Structure formats: structure tokens, C-alpha cells
Amino acid sequence: MDPFSVAKTIKVLRKERGYSLNKLSLQSGLSKGYLSKIENGINTPTITTMARIATALEVDVTYFFQPQGDTNQNRKMVSVRKHERKEINIKAPDSVVRKRWPLASRKFDRQMHPYIIEVPVGTPNLYQFEGQEFYYLLEGRIEFTYGGETYVFDEGDSIYIDCDIPYSGRSMGPGPAKVLVVVYHLGPKE
């Protein structure tokens, strides 16, 4: 493993995903400073660390060991079959969502980020960022608060929002609700 090649691959992939170092830190559970040292070739990550980074960037850890010309980076169309979809457990302390399933993880230059997520029962977190989100409720019922107003959405309902206004959501059922969400970030902020 060439540490400089791995460092460059992590940085390029992070930027392609539109992730700031702060967002990668939250998604991976690694400090922003440590990630910066990895990307600059100062620290060499262990396999365990690389696995955490890979999960946060929605790739298999083997991605860092393959020649980058052999990936889907330049493809106009990619697919993820149902049996290939991976469940990602989220450890970010600022998110109540603990499970998501990426639906387009092989498209590296994507502008949108589609997922299936589980929205838990309980106290929701408040979110706000520069971008937009689309939700389609697959299962359950959710209470959604946007700009101080509360709405109830049922299976089959959809929502499209500008995310610069504070919002939150929670499942109203006995268990989590399942939602198709498409996220569009206006760009990384460092």
C-alpha cells in the first residue's frame, strides 16, 4: 500500500462526494485533524481506519487498493442491484438516523445522493444546511417540522424542501419509518 496514493484517493473521493473534512469526520467518527493528516500523507491509516473512511464515503475498503482507472469514475450510468445494496450504520452524534442504504454509491461524480433511511421514533434532531432534499415515505407515518410548522405524512406522501430552513422528522409509529431520500448539497464547506 502506497500511503501517498491512498491519501490522494481519499481526498479525491471525499471531494467528489461533496464532503467537507468536518462531514467526513462526523460520518466516520474520526477527528477532522486526523483525517487531514491522512489526506496530507502525514499519518498512514490502519485497515480499521480505512474501513471507517470507506463506509463514510460509501465504498468498499478494497476501493483504496485498486487502480483508479478501473473504477466507475467516468461512467455516465451505473447501477446498484438490490442484492448489492449495503446497509450503513451511522455513528454521527448529530443524527438520529442510524441506518441508511445508499442507492447510487457507484456514481462518483453525482450531484444528488439517494438513500433509503430509517427515521426512528423519539426526539428528532434539528437539521439545516445549504441544499435541497426530497423525501418519499415508503413505510410508516412521520411527523415533520419545517420552519416551526408541523406536518404529518403517511405512506406514499412526498416532501421537497430547501434545507436552509431548520427542519426535523420523527416516526409516529411503534417502530421506525422507512423513507426514500434524495439529498442535493450545494457544495462542501471547509
Image: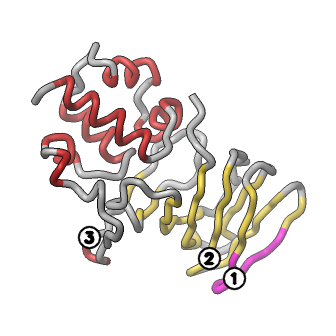
Residue 93, position as x, y percentages in the image: 55, 39
Disc 1 packing (10 Å; few <14; some 14–19; many ≥20): few
Q: Which residue is mark 1?
A: 157
Whether residue 29 sits left or right of residue 137 in the image: it is left
Q: CA distance from mark 3 to mark 2?
A: 22 Å
Give the residue displayed 46% in from the left and 32% down from the top. Answer: 25
Does the stretch in magenta take in 153? yes
> SS of the residue at dot 1?
loop
Residue placed furthest toward the right: 149
Residue type at the position of mark 2: Tyr
Report if the CB atoms under discs 3 and 2 are less than 8 Å apart.
no
Image quadrant for the C terminus? top right
Q: Earlier in the sequence, mark 3 or mark 1?
A: 3
Q: Which residue is mark 3?
A: 84
Q: Give the residues drawn in magenta, as a range.
A: 151-158
> SS of the residue at dot 3?
helix
Q: CA distance from mark 2 to mark 1?
A: 6 Å
Report if the CB atoms under discs 2 and 1 are less than 8 Å apart.
yes
Q: Earlier in the sequence, mark 2 or mark 1?
A: 2
* Residue 136's disc number: 2
